[in-house]
Amino acid sequence: MIGNKEKRKKGTFIVIDGGEGAGKTTVSKAVVEQLGWNAIGAREPGGSQYAEKIRELVLSDLAKYSDVETQFALFWAARRDFLKHVVIPALNAGKTVITDRFDSSTYAYQIAAQGNPQLEKLFWQTRELFLEEYEPDAYILLDIDPEIGIARAKGRGDGNINHFDKRKIDFHIKVNKGLREFVLQKVGANKMCKSAGEVVDASQGLDKVIEDVLALVHKITDK
Ligand code: Z5A
């Protein structure tokens, strides 16, 4: 496997992931704000004009008429466009890119929670082909008990609900297990790829979560 930063040299690419209501949106925004002009934030699915169109499709109720292979392909298509138009130019300009979700979510949702282990081989092949030398330097998992996360997301009360949000708690428990598996067992030196995996306890107060994530971001960008 070709090393990410060794070959790329410029910029730092960090993913913040977690289950529903873990605080990804709130924490990524705060971190990007504190990092200042040299950082950009984005979310997945979406993040580029074309990928935002795919986002509408994959999060719409029409998704119930498509199978998981179709969904898998659409999430990767959106990711490739986002990478080409947003992430690569920013990294080449030496910026720090912080994304709210990335391929760790495909692993956790489509493979682990939707129960499709047969897609794992294709996942790693697609990852290598689509991400080229731009794989993330690190994944930071905001780890939270799904029941607490869901209660937080509901408490937000913005009515922003998609078909994943409507799934039963068992599904969200599997998502959390998939995310932990990805960050703790699949990424890291001598594993499936060279990206680093870090975990932050997201049940802590918001200020402490932001402080912990910022400390990790500084550690990763200073490497
Ligand atoms: N998906 C997929 O299946 N495959 C893929 O490859 C990708 C994605 C990339 C996108 O949903 C969906 O796409 C997602 C997975 C799937 N499924 N779902 N659901 P989305 O982008 O619409 O939503 P989300 O990613 O699930 O995010 P969220 O529900 O908005 O959660 P969040 O961003 O982690 O949380 P938040 O909005 O920052 O915080 C929620 C509330 O909690 C808010 O009121 C905060 O003020 C509060 N909060 C946050 N942190 C704390 C702490 N520490 N203490 C107390 N309160 C807090």
Image (tube, grey):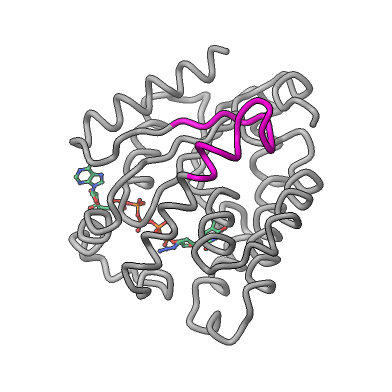
Q: Residue 147, located in which quarter of the rendered image?
A: bottom left
Residue 205 appears left or right of 161:
left
* Whole-percent x, y for residue 211 in the image: 29, 24
Residue at the bottom extreme, as displayed: 65
* Whole-percent x, y for residue 111 in the image: 59, 61
Ligand number 1: quarter of image: bottom left
| Residue at point 52%, 20% (across, down) | 220
Residue 14 appears left or right of 215:
right
* Whole-percent x, y for residue 206 in the image: 22, 37
Question: Where 142 sits versus 49, above or below?
Answer: above
* Whole-percent x, y for residue 177 in the image: 43, 52
Q: Is 195 one of the magenta-colored residues?
A: yes
Q: Which quadrant: the N terminus?
A: top right
178 vs 200, nearest the viewer: 178
Question: Where 106 sits versus 205, above or below?
Answer: below
Q: Which quadrant: the C terminus?
A: top right
Looking at the image, how many numbered discs can be counted on the residues? Answer: 0
Q: In the image, which residues are magenta?
A: 181-198
| Residue at point 53%, 69% (across, down) | 114
95 vs 187, nearest the viewer: 187
| Residue at point 38%, 45% (across, down) | 24
4 vs 170, nearest the viewer: 170
Q: Residue 168, located in which quarter of the rendered image?
A: bottom left
Q: Residue 169, located in which quarter of the rendered image?
A: bottom left
Question: Where 24 sits versus 68, above or below?
Answer: above
| Residue at point 28%, 32% (across, down) | 209
